[in-house]
Image (cartoon, rainbow, N blue to C red):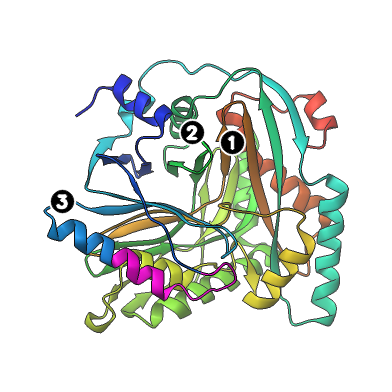
C-alpha cells in the first residue's frame, strides 16, 4: 500500500479516481483509460453505451486484469458527456489514512461571484409555484451555483482530505474531468449499491439547516419529521425509487416512515430501501443507477415536466452536478452516489453547486436560504466562514 504522500500526489496529478464510502476509500490502480461514449446528445436511451461498458469490463477480465472496474461521473442529463474510466485493478484504503495526516490549511479566496443571483433564483421559485397551479407539475428541483477564485492554486488532495475529515459519513469523491478539471464533493445520498444480489438505495428529500445549538438541532430534527411540506416532498422520491426497484427485486423493503440523517450543515429526511435482485434481473449497479436516474430528489415529478422547467428556469448547464458518481466491477457490484454537495475545481478557479426541491408550499426566501446552507459543505472545506461581507454578496 502507498504511503500518504504518494496517495496525495496521485490525487493532485489526476492519475486515479478516489471514492470514499463508510470509512473506506476505493482507489483505482494502474493507468486510467478514458471510455469514449458513443451516444447522441439529445437521447436518454443509454442501453447501447451501457452494453459498451459491459464489454469493456469483460475484455479486461478476459485479458487477466485482477479486479477490473469502470469508475467516474455521469451528468444530470444527456447534454453532458460522461466522464468514465476503466482500470485494471483497485485497492481499498482506510479513510483514517487521509484524515490523520496533519492540519489542513485554509484557502485564501480572492473573489466569490454568483452565477445565479438571489433575484434570479427567487424569481425562478415563484415561476415554479405558478407552474404548479396550471400544469400537472408537482415538484421541481431548482439549483444555483457560485464561482470562486483563489489567490493560490487549489490542490485536489487538500480539498479531498478536508471534505473527508469534515464529512466522514458522506460519499466523498475525486474524479478527473476534461480540461484539467477535477470533480470533488461529499454527497450524503446513495443512489444505489449492489453487493451480489443485494441492493440498497437511500433517497433523501426534505431538509433543514443545522445550528450550533444542540437543543435547537434536536427540535429541528423533530420538526422535520412532522413537516407536511418536507414529508410531501420526500414521498415523491421514495415512491419513485421503490416503484423502479420493485421491477427488479424480490422482497423489496421500503420503510413507511422516514428517519433523519445529519451532515455537518444539514438535516435530511432519509429512507433506506433494500431488496434482493431476482435471478432474471441480474443488472449491474450502473444499469440499476440509470434505471433510477434522475430521481425526483434532483429533478422533480413528473420527470418530463420537471426537466422542461429546469431548462426554462435555470440559467446555466448543470453538467456533472446532480448526476451520479461511483464504480461498477465485472460482476456488476458497485456503488453510485448522487452528485450533490460538489464542485468543479481547476487551478485557482472553482464552481460550487446547490439545489432545493420546490413544491407548492415552498417559499422563495426559504429555498434560497436552504441552498446557501447546502453550499456550506463545500465552503467549510475551504475553511471559509460566511462573514458579513460574504452575506452582503448574497451567499445566505
Check if mark 2's residue and mark 1's residue have beta carbons within 8 Å: yes
Q: Nearer the viewer, residue 329 or 249?
A: 329
Q: CA distance from mark 2 to mark 1?
A: 8 Å
Q: Position of residue 306 (x, y in %)?
A: 69, 71
Residue position marked by numbered label 1 in the rendering: 378
Name the secondary structure under disc 1: helix
Mark 3 or mark 2: name the one nearer the start of the chain: 3
Neighbor class of circle 2 (other Cα within 10 Å; few <14, some 14-19, many 20+) is many
The numbered dot on residue 241 is none
Q: In the picture, which quadrant includes the N terminus? A: top left
Q: Residue placed at 30% from the left, 73% from the top?
A: 283
Q: Position of residue 222 (x, y in %)?
A: 60, 53
Q: Is residue 148 magenta?
A: no
Q: Nearer the viewer, residue 36 or 107?
A: 36
Q: Nearer the viewer, residue 332 or 207?
A: 332
Report the span colored magenta: 40-54
Residue position marked by numbered label 2 in the rendering: 163
Lateral position of residue 147 relative to residue 153, left or right: right
Q: CA distance from mark 3 to mark 2?
A: 32 Å
Q: Position of residue 46 (x, y in %)?
A: 45, 72
Q: Residue 77's quadrant in the figure?
A: bottom right
Q: Position of residue 300 (x, y in %)?
A: 65, 69
The numbered dot on residue 65 is 3
109 is higher (above) or lower (below) than 269: above
**Residue 172 visible in the picture:** yes
Amino acid at each position: 500500500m502507498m504511503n500518504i504522500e504518494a496517495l496525495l500526489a496521485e490525487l493532485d496529478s489526476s492519475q486515479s479516481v478516489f471514492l470514499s464510502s463508510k470509512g473506506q476509500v476505493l482507489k483505482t490502480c494502474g493507468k486510467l483509460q478514458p471510455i469514449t461514449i458513443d451516444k447522441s446528445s439529445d437521447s436518454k436511451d443509454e442501453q447501447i453505451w451501457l452494453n459498451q461498458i459491459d464489454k469493456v469490463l469483460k475484455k479486461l477480465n478476459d485479458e487477466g486484469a485482477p479486479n477490473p472496474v469502470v469508475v467516474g461521473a455521469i451528468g444530470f442529463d444527456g447534454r453532458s458527456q460522461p466522464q468514465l474510466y476503466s482500470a485494471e485493478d483497485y485497492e481499498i484504503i482506510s479513510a483514517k489514512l487521509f484524515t490523520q495526516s496533519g492540519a489542513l490549511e485554509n484557502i485564501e479566496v480572492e473573489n466569490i461571484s454568483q452565477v445565479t443571483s438571489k433575484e434570479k433564483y427567487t424569481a425562478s421559485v415563484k415561476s415554479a409555484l405558478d407552474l404548479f397551479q396550471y400544469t400537472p407539475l408537482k415538484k421541481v428541483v431548482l439549483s444555483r451555483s457560485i464561482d470562486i477564485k483563489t489567490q493560490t492554486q487549489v490542490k485536489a488532495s487538500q480539498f479531498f482530505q478536508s471534505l473527508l475529515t469534515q464529512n466522514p459519513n458522506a460519499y466523498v469523491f475525486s474524479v478527473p474531468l476534461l480540461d484539467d478539471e477535477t470533480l470533488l464533493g461529499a454527497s450524503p445520498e446513495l443512489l444505489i449499491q449492489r453487493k451480489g444480489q443485494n441492493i440498497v438505495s437511500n433517497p433523501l428529500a426534505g431538509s433543514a439547516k443545522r445550528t450550533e445549538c444542540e437543543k435547537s438541532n434536536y427540535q429541528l430534527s423533530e420538526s422535520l419529521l412532522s413537516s407536511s411540506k418536507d414529508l410531501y416532498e420526500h414521498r415523491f422520491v421514495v415512491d419513485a425509487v421503490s416503484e423502479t426497484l420493485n421491477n427488479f427485486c424480490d422482497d423489496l423493503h421500503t420503510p413507511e416512515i422516514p428517519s433523519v440523517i445529519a451532515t455537518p450543515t444539514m438535516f435530511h429526511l432519509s429512507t433506506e430501501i433494500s431488496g434482493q435482485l431476482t435471478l432474471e434481473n441480474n443488472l449491474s449497479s450502473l444499469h440499476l443507477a440509470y434505471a433510477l436516474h434522475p430521481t425526483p430528489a434532483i429533478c422533480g415529478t413528473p420527470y418530463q415536466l420537471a426537466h422542461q422547467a429546469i431548462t426554462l428556469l435555470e440559467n446555466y448547464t448543470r453538467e456533472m452536478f446532480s448526476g451520479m458518481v461511483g464504480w461498477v466491477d465485472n460482476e456488476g457490484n458497485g456503488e453510485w452516489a448522487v452528485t450533490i454537495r460538489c464542485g468543479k475545481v481547476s487551478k485557482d478557479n472553482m464552481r460550487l453547486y446547490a439545489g432545493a426541491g420546490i413544491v407548492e408550499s415552498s417559499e422563495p426566501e426559504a429555498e434560497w436560504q436552504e441552498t446557501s446552507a447546502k453550499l456550506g459543505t463545500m465552503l467549510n472545506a475551504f475553511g471559509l466562514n460566511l462573514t458579513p461581507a460574504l452575506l452582503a454578496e448574497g451567499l445566505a
